[in-house]
Amino acid sequence: MPDTAHSPDPLPIVWNPDDRIGDMLKGRRGLVLGVANENSIAFGCAAKLRAFGAEVALTYADDRTRSFVAPLAERIGASLLLPLNVEQPGELDAVFERIKREWGRLDFVVHSIAFAPKADLHGRVIDCSADGFARAMRISVYSFLELARAAEPLMAAGGALLTMSYYGADKVVNHYNVMGLAKASLQAAVRYLAAELGEKNIRVYAVSPGPLQTRAASGIAHFDELIEAAVNRSPGHRLVDIAEIGRVVAFLVGGGASGMTGDTIYVDAGLHNMA
């Protein structure tokens, strides 16, 4: 479970409209990918974006995932809940057609999906299979480019594109393996997209949280050791939680970050600064 003991604003266990904390994002509409359960980074982002007044659309990868995501969408009052498996042809186009029909525009996208086959993730990078590498890059990186391309025409007045990275993109992290290569590519994509879309006032960011006990992270070998090391090494000897990540995402989506683009923003309790 995420460590909320030290968070000044932990995510409410039960979210409802009374949890609203402001209207900083009132009138903004955005798409959030990657909610799997209430511990997901994507759910922390969606809940905080709603708390600041934004309308959100959520996606689910398949029928099994929908059974977990639908109650969360209802909990935070998500405007749309749409099927999207980025490996299935046509599903991404269908999502954006629905958003265009319902909203007519889009102000932000939060991309919080990543995957690598277990055999490739747990093995050495040098032993990664071509198919495993291609699938990791397809889901973890290329899907962000697809989202940006689909969102661009709906962001005529500008907007923000965000994705989730990790410190393993910058330095070697034991057992992160091929996902480190994918996240490094993702951060490079953020810089290039920022350069290409800047004239349209579309800002692009990578958010790099510290390790959290999410379902996605559970696939990394010896993840408990990574958690323990993060607590021991971070300045405050603590983890971050999904509410803290969500607040940073809300800031980046809002006007307060208008002078920033192409950056990787670390939300890891200072862990990346420590030797």
Image (cartoon, helix red, strand yellow):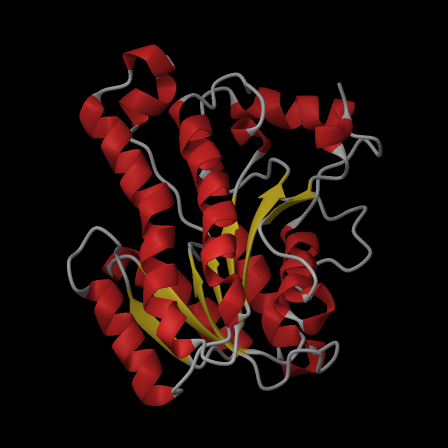
Q: Is residue 91 left or right of residue 141?
A: left
Residue 62 visible to the viewer? yes
The answer to which quarter of the image holds residue 28 is bottom right
Percent position (x, y) of residue 168?
A: 54, 28
Which of the pair 72/259 is nearer the observer?
Answer: 259
Which of the pair 157/67 is nearer the observer?
Answer: 157
The quarter of the image holding the C terminus is top right
- Relative to 78, residue 179 above or below: above
The quarter of the image holding the N terminus is top right
Task: Tell me which residue sits at (63%, 52%) in the image.
Answer: 242
Percent position (x, y) of residue 63?
A: 24, 61
Which of the pair 60/176 is nearer the observer?
Answer: 176
- Relative to 216, residue 262 above or below: below
- Relative to 119, residue 183 above or below: below
- Relative to 241, residue 275 above or below: above
The answer to which quarter of the image holds residue 136 is top left
Task: Tell me which residue sits at (45%, 21%) in the image.
Answer: 221
Residue 39 visible to the viewer? no
The number of discs equals: 0
Percent position (x, y) of residue 59?
A: 36, 65
Task: Tell me which residue sits at (23%, 69%) in the image.
Answer: 93
Task: Tell me which residue sits at (67%, 48%) in the image.
Answer: 241
Percent position (x, y) of residue 14?
A: 61, 68
Q: Is residue 140 left or right of residue 88?
A: right
Residue at the outermost left position: 89
Which of the pair 234/262 is nearer the observer?
Answer: 262
